Amino acid sequence: MMIEQGRVIAADSDWAEVEAGGSGCSSCGTASACGVPKEGKAGLHGRMVLRLANTVGAKTDDIVDLSVSSESMTTAVGVAYGLPTVGMIAGMAVAHGLFGSSGEALGALLGALSGFVGARLAAARIPSGVRILAIANTAPTPGSALPIYFQAALSKE
């Protein structure tokens, strides 16, 4: 599990729109090209805007801690990179079978493009695996080394 922070840009009692994309996203080599979120859309400055259940009573401009499950991250990466790669290889193989070596390049291109379309469609069906843990800009409980939600989250690893 990965813990990130985000800023609430809109909230009501049920849902919060959180602008995310902190340290984990900025260190990723494909941060500028990322476009396969489940519930996200491109936000300001390359960040993602996620619509999440507001289970902690967050308000606009609150900083919240987000839990990102490892399983959903692995699935998203597999879909984002795996489907286009498989599409490219399959397209090249089919084109080689139909047209010989002269059609391989076009087949690879068409296969990769169909893989990207497939990845976009599959991304809409992947559970997000992101949830709001707590409001980060509130004072922690006196005497605790880690906030209680971190202790609970870390014990599940």
Image (spheres, rainbow, N blue to C red):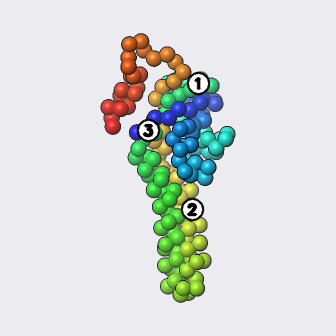
Crowdedness of circle 2 by 10 Å Cα count: few (<14), some, many (20+)?
many
- Which residue in the protein does label 2 denote? 116
- Which residue in the protein does label 3 denote? 2
Where is residue 142 drawn, in percent x and y? 41, 12
For the point 53% across and 47% down, which residue is it?
28
| Figure check: 94 above or below 62 | below
Q: How far apart are labels 3 and 2 at the CA level?
A: 26 Å
Query: Is residue 51 in view from this perspective?
Result: no
For the point 58% across and 62% down, which residue is it?
117
For the point 50% across and 30% down, which residue is it?
65
Which residue sits furthest right? 44
- Which residue in the protein does label 1 denote? 62
Closer to viewer: mark 3 or mark 2: 3
| Figure check: 67 above or below 13 | below
For the point 39% across and 22% down, which residue is it?
146
Q: How far apart are labels 1 and 3 at the CA level?
A: 20 Å
Check disc 1 and report its element: helix, strand or loop.
loop
**Considering depth in this image, is 118 or 23 the residue closer to the camera?**
23
